[in-house]
Amino acid sequence: MKILIVDDEQDIREILSFNLRNEGYTVDTASSAEEALEVLSPEHKLILLDVMMGGMSGYQMAEKLRKDGNATPIIFLTARDTENDMLTGFSVGGDDYISKPFSLKEVSARVRAVLKRTPAEGKKFTHGEFTMDFETKELTIGGVHVPLTKTEFEVLSLLVSNPAKVYSRQEMIDRLWSDAPYTTERTVDVHITRLRKKLGSYGRWIFSRAGYGYRFNPSEV
């Protein structure tokens, strides 16, 4: 798989490139968001994206990609590690978030986690105007495409694949982020919040069970 590393620090680009190539990935690099937008292609299956760069920031680049319909998974790299920064990263379409300084083992684990999440079983789920196609990785509501990031789609797929089952936050982490030991329960909550917002009135199909977790059950609405 081909990965694009975007960071204005040469040392970080070089060490990440060396490590990921040793793990079998093909790697391209860019020193700015502007350069990254020029070299990014459908062959890239993941973007490691620095947040704070001169010119266009990583957040701005991610937001532009999502508005343009580009769903390439994004893992943010940043020295800013407050909860608000994490929320901002997810809100603009990021799939994961790694704080600097980071270990190469953590980066490798999170890359594997994003690229190897298990898809839901079956080909489609349809309930009224709501349709999830697990082969094309697309969600449509009333015939209108709803843009979801890879992580958002996999979270929703897990819930949809077994309607009425309550998934605890830890169970969701174990199923979707098994290779990323640093993932917290707050990460799950952020993705659920973003999913509900994107689903609009259909967001109420995702129920919260206090003290337990989340479930998907349109039949109760």
Image (spheres, grey):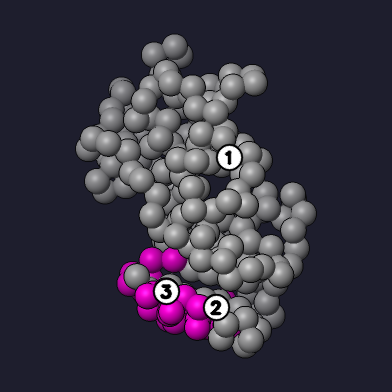
Q: Amino acid at mark 2?
A: Leu
Percent across and percent down for residue 168 are 55, 28
Quadrant for the C terminus, please.
top left
> Magenta includes 19?
yes
Of the residues under marks 1 and 3, which one precedes in the sequence? 3
SS state under label 1:
helix
Quadrant for the N terminus, please.
bottom left
Residue 112, disc: none
C-alpha separation, residue under disc 3 versus residue under disc 2: 11 Å
41 on left or right of 109: left
Marks 3 and 1: in contact by CB < 8 Å? Answer: no
Of all residues, the one furthest to the left in this rendering is 123
SS state under label 2:
helix
Q: Amino acid at mark 3?
A: Glu
Quadrant of the rendered structure where residue 217 is? top left
Is 20 in front, or is 41?
20
Q: Amino acid at mark 1?
A: Val
- What residue range appears in magenta? 17-46
Write the residue at 59% across / 22% down: 212
Residue 16, disc: 2
Q: Is residue 39 above or below residue 166?
A: below
Question: Which residue does the numbered mark 1 point to in the structure image?
Answer: 188
Residue 194 visible at all: no
Question: Which residue does the numbered mark 3 point to in the structure image?
Answer: 23
> Magenta includes 221?
no
Local packing at callout 2 (Cα closer than 10 Å; few below 14, some 14-19, many 20+) is some
